[in-house]
Image (spheres, helix red, strand yellow):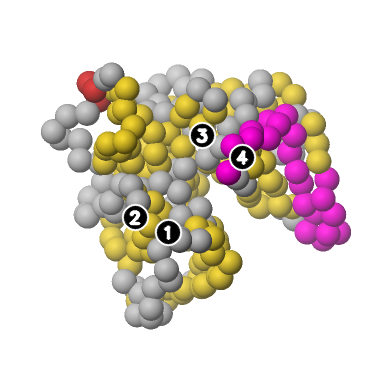
Amino acid sequence: MSFSTLAFNSFTIIYLQSVGDEEIFLPSDEIWVYDLERGIWEVFHMTGQVPPSMSGSCSSSLNGNMYIFGGCDDNGQTNQMYCVDLMDGKYTWKKILQEFGSAPSPRDKLSCWVYNGRLIYFGGYGHKILSEMNSRNRSFILDETSWVEDMFWGWNNEVHIFDPIQMSWSEPQTHGRPPAPRAAHAGATLGSKGYICGGRVMETRTSDIHCLDLETWTWSEIVPLSNLPVGRSWHTLTTVSDTAMFLFGGLSVDFPLSSAGGWCQKRANPY
């Protein structure tokens, strides 16, 4: 199953998208809310500019709103963004149209960091037209099994910023050695840093951990002193304290994973 989930106040918000191998898209006009204090699930009907039914979208919470970006519907990957107010109880979708900058190319299975009032997206799988691919673009690994005429699919390691106040897209100049392109990885924000872990490129699933300083836009790789978990995709990475993030589940090359692992960072040294 594919879904977007986020924490909001004392609730867990789940926006269901698709069902596993059957490739059935679930209704996009409903949202499930779990009350952590009462232990009760509730489902609410959504109205407004309802997004198409999709899988692999990226959700995030900022100032009482849930944003979803990207995903894959019956027509393939998209680069559309939608927003819903979680505080007014009406659950009315609104399609976001940027006023400045260019949106990222269509993609799904990406991640998002929320920092300083902005949404910062990394990676994903999607398509680019031939004119967007050149010798300077080393952030795109071509999926040689999937292309049509002058359109090519593949994995990227791009960083894109959306500012909801300015309604603008921008692409920062990053420094350091970036992670390899990937999709279906996990991401989390801890302080002023964005972390990613694992993911898939071609038939390989990884368990490496990388950090992007969201002030200086400098990449660094985290090398834990303990053993790494098995490579995986479709897992979660959740910040649980000022020094720790929790890794859960996912899909390895051979089978789904039910094990969970945690890793901590204290000062500059993970342990």
Which residue is located at x 35 percent, y 51 percent?
Answer: 203
What residue sits right under mark 3 in the picture?
71
Question: Who's the residue at 33% across and 41% down the image?
Answer: 155
Binning the other alpha carbons within 10 Å of mark 4 as few (below 14), some (14 to 19) or many (20 upward) gives few
Could you say which quadrant of the image residue 168 lies in?
A: top left
Residue wearing tag 2:
204
In this view, the residue in front, 133 or 214, is 133
CB under 8 Å between callouts 4 and 1? no
Q: Earlier in the sequence, mark 4 or mark 2?
A: 4
Pick whichever of labels 4 and 1 is earlier in the sequence.
4
* 134 is higher (above) or lower (below) than 263: above
Q: CA distance from mark 4 to mark 2?
A: 23 Å
The answer to the question of whether label 2 and label 1 lie on touching residues, with beta carbons closer than 8 A, is yes
Report which residue position mark 4 lands on: 22
77 vs 139, nearest the viewer: 77
Residue 30: image x %, image y %? 75, 34
Cα distance between the residues tagged 2 and 3: 21 Å
Q: Are marks 3 and 4 in contact (CB under 8 Å)?
A: no
